[in-house]
Amino acid sequence: MAESQLDVKTAAFWLSEAWGEDIPQSHVRMRKNWLFVRYPNYIDDKQSLNDPTWDGYGYRQIRKGWEDEVDIIRAPMPSADHPGMVASTDLWAEPFYDIKYQNSPFIPHNHKRVHKVIEELNEEWEVTA
């Protein structure tokens, strides 16, 4: 299978496993051989320490919008032998780069900016598409 045949469901599952947290498919976009991941911004709920129903450690987290930047990760290859799995030596899915949200594929019809970002990434990392 070619790298371009990786689906968003498998990519989100791989990221969730590598990062140790649930990454919804809606937070992932795939372009060429790169994954773009948008991450919510969380703040500490200082009041949660006084809440008798809060049984967690530290503060509860409140989602407050989105991060200003989008992480970019090299997409793994789908496994030819095991559908729904990937063949990758990247256990951590470490982001290669991050970009401003305005240059990401999360904005509809943003093809020119995304294409420019991908060209720069491929050139910098000497990736053949």
Image: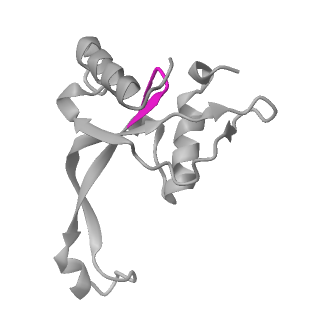
Single out the residue that lies furthest toward the right: 81
Residue 66: percent from the left, percent from the top? 22, 46
Residue 48: percent from the left, percent from the top? 24, 79
Which residue is found at the position 63% from the left and 31% from the top?
Answer: 77
Q: Nearer the viewer, residue 37 or 108?
A: 37
Q: Nearer the viewer, residue 51 or 124?
A: 124
Which residue is found at the position 60% from the left and 36% from the top?
Answer: 10
Q: Which residues are magenta?
A: 29-36
Which residue is found at the position 48% from the left and 36% from the top?
Answer: 74
Which residue is found at the position 69% from the left and 39% from the top?
Answer: 85
Q: Quadrant of the N terminus?
A: top right
Residue 15: percent from the left, percent from the top? 52, 46
Q: Quadrant of residue 126?
A: top left
Q: Quadrant of residue 51?
A: bottom left
Query: Which is the main secondary structure of the residues drawn in magenta?
Result: strand
Q: Please determine whether, in this image, residue 35 is positioned above or below residue 94.
A: above
Apparent side of residue 40 relative to residue 16 in the rendered image (left or right): left
Apparent side of residue 14 relative to residue 96 in the rendered image (left or right): right
Apparent side of residue 69 relative to residue 92 in the rendered image (left or right): left
Q: Quadrant of residue 54?
A: bottom left
